[in-house]
Image: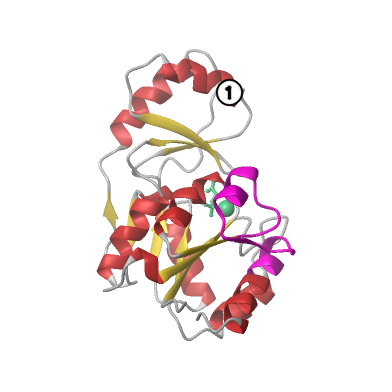
Amino acid sequence: MKFKAIVADIDGTITCEKRELHLGAMKKIRSLKVPVVLATGNTLCYARTASRLIGLEGAVIAENGGAVTVRFDLQGTFEESLEECEKAYSFLSEYFKLTKLDPLYRKTEIALRRDFDLEKARALLKTQNLDIEMVDTKYAIHLKSTKINKGVGLQKLAGMMGLEAEDFVAIGDSENDVEMFEASGFGIAVANGDEKIKEAANYVTDASFGDGTVEAIEFLESNGWI
Ligand SMILES: O=C(O)COP(=O)(O)O
Ligand SMILES: [Mg+2]
């Protein structure tokens, strides 16, 4: 097996436990010859800044696939999905006190603080005729279109880079990374990952957080897969 690129989740994967960047993972990523794409549930400006500060090229998937850019000098592309998310938000606001995270910068979905009953909210949302789902990343709960995810974002970005999604190894830690694992050629979950991502993974590291990403890349190198 030989892969041409890596797509790495940000929070919980290239960070430490308290969410600060993991310096060992940064160093390892910078040493790679293959392109590294960042994929996050967070906003596009967050992803682009992280890419710049890590020393990457600006190819990022943000807002769980809703926003994508291939280089720093190009504007992003944004899916038209916010309106439907707003409808779901208005409906759920009748039952819960919800807090939006970074609404000023988020253009395709809504991220919420994790301080309400998710299972109850999911059951209520099912009674509505909306193509919206709720995804828990352990950092936020995302109200997002069922048609958009990091896997769809990876297909799109891979095309822009002249690659196939299967050319990528994906590294991640939570349920918002599952579709990205499915679209990629090989998925590696870090040890702190949730059950859903570990189930979707081809390989699970022994180490957690950024140490897990270092281990994942060393595993790929030792097999000659990158
Ligand atoms: O924004 C979040 O909720 C989590 O972000 P992540 O996809 O980089 O882990
Ligand atoms: Mg994550």
Which residue is at the far front? 1
Looking at the rendering, which quadrant does residue 184 occupy? bottom left
Element type where label 1 sits in the image: helix
Q: Which amino acid does label 1 sit on?
A: Glu
Q: Does the residue labelled 1 lie within 8 Å of ligand 1?
A: no
Q: Toward the viewer: 118 or 89?
A: 118
Residue placed at 36% from the left, 64% from the top? 165
x 44%, y 65%: residue? 185
Location of residue 114 with respect to 182 vertically, above or below: above
Residue 59 appears in the picture as rendered: no
Instruction: Write down the residue under mark 1.
Output: 119
The x, y position of residue 39, in whole percent, is: 46, 59
What colouring does the structure picture have? Answer: secondary structure
Q: Is residue 50 among the parts visible in the rendering?
A: yes
Residue at 59% over, 48% down:
199
In the rendered view, would you say 38 is above or below 104?
Answer: below
Q: In this view, does 188 lie to the left or right of 105?
A: right
- Left or right, residue 199 beside residue 86: right
The residues colored magenta run: 189-213
Residue 148 position (above or below residue 17): above
- The x, y position of residue 102, in whole percent, is 48, 43
Q: Position of residue 191 (x, y in %)?
A: 70, 57
